[in-house]
Amino acid sequence: MNVNKIILGDCERVLEKFPDNSIDLIFTSPPYADQRKRTYGGIKPGEYVDWFLPKTEQFLRVLKPTGTFILNIKERVVNGERHTYVIQLILEMRKQGWLWTEEFIWHKKNSYPGKWPNRFRDAWERLLQFNKQRKFNMYQEAVMIPVGDWAQDRLANLSETDRIRDESKVESGFGKNISNWVGRDKVYPDNVIHMATECSNRNHSAAFPIDLPTWFIKLFTVEGDMVLDPFVGSGTTAVAAKQLGRDYVGIDINDEYCRVAKERVLQIQPGLFDQAKYSHVARERVAQSQPHLMERAANYTPEDLE
């Protein structure tokens, strides 16, 4: 298998040569229906599912059992209503054996204003999470965020209920213990990701910001893991993977995109492993494969948040 390469070709055909269970994370944004016509032919909404399913069959084969597939996709409007091809795709992928584990929302903070007679500006996109099994690698400490100003007042005056696990009043099965967050400066994020769009398109019609794949690479991989983008475009996912010390494979059918992607990754020096951003399990994996990195990192053990 070609490692740390940008490969020119149709991902469906290229991946046929890849071994089973060899990829830790697939992160990609395929062409949306009726878009990127000059590059990918502009797949019609009614034909999109049949076009994409042979590719997801290969993704399912090459992904490790503990791996994750993140699909950035959004329905388009056809004849005044949202088309259902994304919903249909999810249902068909479940028949292939995928688990639709989660859905993240990318809120585009810098969307410009617009006016339409029957809808508002699209300021978000889906990032669908698929897995092969219920137990998969996930390093939540890697994406923790500052606790925020709310904690100063809220945690200063705890009630008796705040000091125990308070079950949901609607009997949803969810509960919380507010006192667990006393003294903490970081918390876990929710599934809405607030990031600006890419302002310079890097010779690509739909480039996303590097912070987007970076966030998911941190969440689902550790250093030395393998990241695949089968529609790599201008190489943003590959650049993010290299910066974080992950191996990568990028595939695209457009030779100009591949040229740009290769130039971009050649300019990147992989960053040092920041131990404080990873869980105990992640540190053990890195310690076994690359002990010299662990020697340079400070000791960090996050407390359990039960």
Image (cartoon, rainbow, N blue to C red):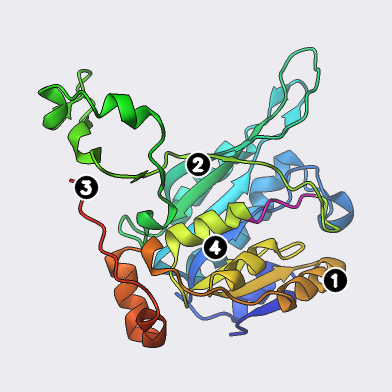
Helix, strand, or loop for circle 4? Answer: strand
The quadrant where residue 232 appears: bottom right
Q: Sequence-wise, which precedes: disc 2 or disc 1?
A: 2
Q: Quadrant of the C terminus?
A: top left
Helix, strand, or loop for circle 3? Answer: loop
Of discs 3 and 4, which sits in the foreground? 3
The quadrant where residue 297 appears: bottom left
Q: x%, y% of residue 80?
A: 75, 20
Real-space Cα separation, disc 4 to disc 1, in angstroms: 21 Å
Q: Amino acid at mark 3?
A: Leu
Q: Amino acid at mark 2?
A: Phe
Q: Which residue is mark 4?
A: 26
Q: Which residue is mark 1?
A: 255
Real-space Cα separation, disc 3 to disc 4, in angstroms: 29 Å
The one nearer the camera, 38 or 150, is: 150
Q: Amino acid at mark 1?
A: Asp
Q: Is residue 98 visible?
A: no
Q: Sequence-wise, which precedes: disc 3 or disc 4?
A: 4
Q: Is mark 3 in CB contact (under 8 Å) with mark 4?
A: no
Helix, strand, or loop for circle 1? Answer: helix
Real-space Cα separation, disc 2 to disc 1, in angstroms: 31 Å
Of discs 1 and 3, which sits in the foreground? 3
Q: Which residue is mark 3?
A: 305
Find out whether residue 121 is within the magenta segment.
no
